[in-house]
Image: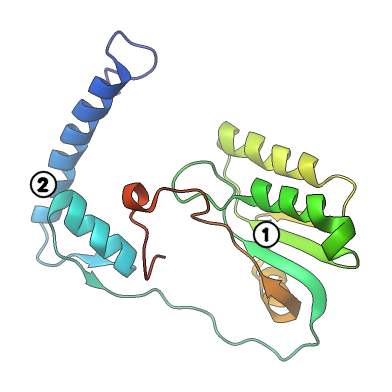
Amino acid sequence: AWPWGGDGPAPPLLKKVVRNAHYGRLWRGVFGSYQRCIANSAFTARWTKERWGIEAGVVYPPVRARFAERPKSNTILSVGRFSQLGARKRQLDMVRAFTGAYDNMFEGWEYLCLGGLSDDPGNRRYFEEVCEAARGYPVRIVANAPDSLIKEAYESASVFWHATGDGEDPARRGGGAGRA
């Protein structure tokens, strides 16, 4: 119930300053009630320190690392949620790059794009746009794929591809060495 949401009378910059001050104070209070703060990456810990002045230890999440030895296929794989918010995975950019270069570089290859998809209408529109851009090419796009498909794809793909961070301003988004 943010009172300045939508197309209210306040200028966008003022809205942003007030919103950041409000949420900064809110989060400092939340973090201040805990004895210890833990982040899931050095990237998150760095931004927790920069944004709220709070030191965070890092505990990396577990990763399933039991993969079968399989023959590799001519498959390029990307995995990430379909969303235009937060750390965007840029599936649309990758589909366009693949289809644009298919005749010269990727003939005989498949691009497999797996990702989570929520019920958010904006995310659904983005997913549909990605699917439309892939039409007519050997591109498989699967939303909310089962773990068995994701595991099999990691085992058999020859290339893992991602474009997270492409085109971002590293100073604004916290980029640099060790970026997650």
Q: Earlier in the sequence, mark 1 or mark 2?
A: 2
Q: Which amino acid lies under the numbered mark 1 shown in the image of this protein?
A: Leu
Q: Report x, y in % for residue 129.
A: 71, 38
Q: CA distance from mark 1 to mark 2?
A: 38 Å
For label 2, the residue is 29
Left or right side of 42 for 109: right
For the point 57% across and 33% down, which residue is it? 122
For the point 26% across and 18% down, which residue is it? 3
Q: Secondary structure at mark 2?
A: helix
Depth check, front residue: 35 or 175? 175
Q: Quadrant of residue 174?
A: bottom left
Q: Report x, y in % for residue 6.
A: 39, 17
Depth check, front residue: 48 or 115? 48
For label 1, the residue is 114
Depth check, front residue: 77 or 142? 77
Crowdedness near tag 2: few (<14), some (14–19) or many (≥20) residues, C-alpha within 10 Å: few
In this picture, is 127 found above or below 63? above
Q: Secondary structure at mark 1?
A: strand
For the point 55% across and 36% down, which residue is it? 120
Quadrant containing the C terminus is bottom left
Q: Nearer the viewer, mark 1 or mark 2?
A: 1
